[in-house]
C-alpha cells in the first residue's frame, strides 16, 4: 500500500499542475494568508480561526507560495490514503486495502486536497491518533488527539467521543491527557493574548447564533452525494446500519476488543461529527454555514464505513464465490462513478479550474497593475483573499489592505485609495451593496469585470477610486 500511496500522490500532483483550482475562493486562500504572514505577525500562531497547529505546520511552506501549501495538502491526502488502510488493518477489517480505494474515490476529499484548507491535516492527525489508540499506544494517541481542536474545531467533538471511550474501556487515569493541547496552547498563547483561557474565549465559533442563518435538519442527508458521490452514499448508509448491529451486540456484551474499538474510533467519530454539524446548522448556532467541506476531515471514516457496507451487502453470499465478485463489483462502481458524467461526478470547469469570480478578479488585477504601476503604495479596500495573493498584499497590514467593513466604519479613506467590490464577499462579509457605493459621490467607478460561472450566473467585480477630499 505504500507504493499505491506514492502513485496516488503522483496522480494528484499531475492533476494539480494540469488545473488552476484553489478549490475554494475564500477560506482556502485565507488560511494560506494567515500562514504566509505568520512570521511577520506572530499572533497568527495563536489565532483560533486560523488554527494554531495548521499555521505552525504550513507557515514554512507558505513562504514559497500557495502552490506549495496545495502540494503539502496533497501529500497529507496521500498519507491519509495509507493511514486509512493501516487503521482498517488494526481493526481487523477484512480486505482493508479497499478502504484506501474508496477514500480515493470520495470527490470531496480529492477536491479539498487541492486547497489551502485545514481538512487534510485534520484527517491526518485524527487517523494517526486513532491508529495509536487502537494499537494501545494510549499516551501517544491521546496527546496527539488533544491538539486536534487546534487543527479544526470539530476536534472538540472527537475528544468528547474519546472521553466516553476511555470510560467504556475503564482507562480513567488517561483522561487528563485529552487536556494537554489546551494546556500547552493556553500557556504559550497567554504571552500573546494575556490570558491562559484564550483557547476558549477566542473561539470564533463560540456563539449561539450564526451570521449565515440556519437550515433544515435533513440538509446533510440531502447533500451527502456532493460529499461522497451516490454509490458511496448508499454504501455509507448500509455501513452505518452494520454499525448499529455492532452497537446492539455491544450492549449484549458479545463483541471482541477490536469491534469495540471500531464502534468508538470509527463509527462514533463519524456519527458525532455528522450529528454535530446537523444540529449546528439546523439551530443556526456556532456560526455554522451548512458547508459540506468539513466532512473532508472525516472522509477516511466514511471510506471504512462504506467498506463495511460492501461487506454487509455481500455477507448473505459469503459461503459462495459470488460474494467475492459482488464486493469487487461494488468497489468497481465506487471507482468508476466519479467519472460517469453524473452531476455529482467531477466536472473539469466546475471543479478543477479557477472559479468565475476569481477569473474576473484576475483580469481586474491585471488592469490595476497596468493602470496604477505604483499600486504597491496604495491602500486597497476589499474582502478578496485571492486579490491580495495576486497583488502580493499583506492582508493584515492596514497600509496595504483594509476590510470593507472597517473602511466604512472608520471612514478613514484617503484620496486615491482603491476599493474593489464583488458580488459575494463584499456583500456577505462586508455588508456593502453595489448600489450604495455607486450612489456615494466620494467614489468614482473605474472598471467592471464580469464572468459567467458554470451554472450560467454572472459574477461581477467592480473597481472604485476614492476621489473625495478629506
Image: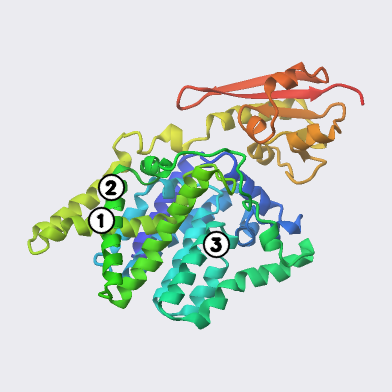
**Who is closer to the viewer here, 158 or 50?**
158
Q: Is label 3 in a helix, a strand or a loop?
A: helix
Q: Residues within 10 Å of mark 1 (few under 14, many from 20)?
A: many
Point out the tag, 1 or 2, that comes first from the N-terminus.
2
Residue 361: image quadrant is top right
What residue is shown with label 3?
156
Q: Quadrant of the C terminus?
A: top right
Task: Decide if residue 355 is on the left or right side of residue 229.
Answer: right
Task: Kindly identify the residue that appears in the image at 71 percent across and 42 percent down.
Answer: 392
Q: CA distance from mark 2 to mark 3?
A: 28 Å
Q: At x 65% / y 40%, what residue is drawn?
A: 385
| Residue carrying label 1 | 309
**What is the spatial separation of the Cα atoms under label 1 and label 2, in whole angstroms?**
8 Å
Q: Are marks 1 and 2 in contact (CB under 8 Å)?
A: yes
Q: Based on the displayed image, in which of its 4 quarters is residue 388 positioned?
A: top right
Residue found at x 68% / y 24%? 433
Amino acid at each position: 500500500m505504500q507504493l499505491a500511496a506514492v502513485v496516488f500522490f503522483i496522480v494528484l500532483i499531475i492533476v494539480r499542475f494540469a488545473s488552476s483550482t484553489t478549490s475554494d475562493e475564500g477560506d482556502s486562500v485565507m488560511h494560506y494568508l494567515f500562514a504566509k504572514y505568520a512570521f511577520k505577525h506572530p499572533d497568527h500562531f495563536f489565532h483560533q480561526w486560523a488554527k494554531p497547529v495548521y499555521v505552525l505546520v504550513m507557515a514554512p511552506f507558505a513562504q514559497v507560495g500557495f502552490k506549495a501549501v496545495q502540494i503539502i495538502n496533497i501529500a497529507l491526502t496521500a498519507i491519509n490514503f495509507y493511514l486509512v488502510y493501516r487503521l482498517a488493518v488494526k481493526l481487523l477489517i477484512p480486505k482493508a486495502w479497499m478502504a484506501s480505494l474508496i477514500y480515493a474515490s470520495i470527490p470531496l476529499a480529492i477536491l479539498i486536497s487541492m486547497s489551502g484548507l485545514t481538512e487534510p491535516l485534520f484527517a491526518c492527525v485524527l487517523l494517526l491518533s486513532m491508529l495509536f489508540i487502537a494499537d494501545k499506544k494510549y499516551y501517544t494517541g491521546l496527546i496527539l488527539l488533544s491538539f486536534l481542536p487546534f487543527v479544526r474545531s470539530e476536534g472538540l467533538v472527537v475528544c468528547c467521543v474519546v472521553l466516553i471511550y476511555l470510560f467504556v474501556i475503564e482507562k480513567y487515569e488517561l483522561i487528563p491527557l485529552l487536556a494537554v493541547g489546551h494546556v500547552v496552547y493556553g500557556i504559550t498563547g497567554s504571552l500573546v493574548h494575556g490570558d491562559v483561557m484564550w483557547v476558549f474565549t477566542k473561539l470564533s465559533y463560540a456563539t449561539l447564533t450564526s451570521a449565515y442563518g440556519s437550515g433544515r435538519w435533513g440538509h446533510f442527508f440531502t447533500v451527502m452525494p456532493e460529499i461522497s458521490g451516490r454509490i458511496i452514499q448508499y454504501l455509507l448508509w448500509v455501513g452505518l446500519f452494520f454499525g448499529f448491529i455492532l452497537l446492539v451486540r455491544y450492549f449484549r456484551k458479545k463483541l471482541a476488543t477490536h469491534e469495540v474499538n471500531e464502534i468508538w474510533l470509527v463509527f462514533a467519530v463519524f456519527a458525532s461529527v455528522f450529528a454535530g454539524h446537523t444540529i449546528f446548522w439546523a439551530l443556526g448556532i456556532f456560526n455554522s454555514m451548512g458547508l459540506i467541506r468539513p466532512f473532508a476531515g472525516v472522509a477516511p471514516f466514511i471510506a471504512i464505513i462504506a467498506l463495511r457496507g460492501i461487506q454487509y451487502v455481500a455477507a448473505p453470499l459469503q459461503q459462495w464465490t459470488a460474494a467475492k465478485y459482488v464486493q469487487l463489483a461494488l468497489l468497481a462502481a465506487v471507482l468508476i462513478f466519479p467519472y460517469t458524467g453524473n452531476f455529482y461526478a467531477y466536472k473539469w470547469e466546475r471543479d478543477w479550474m479557477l472559479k468565475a469570480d476569481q477569473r474576473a478578479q484576475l483580469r481586474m488585477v491585471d488592469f490595476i497593475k497596468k493602470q496604477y504601476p505604483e499600486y504597491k503604495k496604495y491602500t486597497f479596500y476589499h474582502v478578496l483573499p485571492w486579490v491580495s495573493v495576486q497583488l502580493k498584499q499583506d492582508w493584515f497590514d492596514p497600509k496595504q489592505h483594509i476590510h470593507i467593513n472597517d473602511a466604512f466604519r472608520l471612514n478613514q479613506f484617503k484620496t486615491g485609495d482603491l476599493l474593489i467590490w464583488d458580488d459575494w464577499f463584499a456583500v456577505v462579509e462586508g455588508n456593502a451593496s453595489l448600489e450604495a457605493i455607486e450612489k456615494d459621490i466620494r467614489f468614482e467607478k473605474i472598471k467592471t469585470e464580469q464572468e459567467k460561472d458554470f451554472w450560467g450566473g454572472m459574477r461581477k467585480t467592480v473597481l472604485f477610486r476614492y476621489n473625495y477630499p478629506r
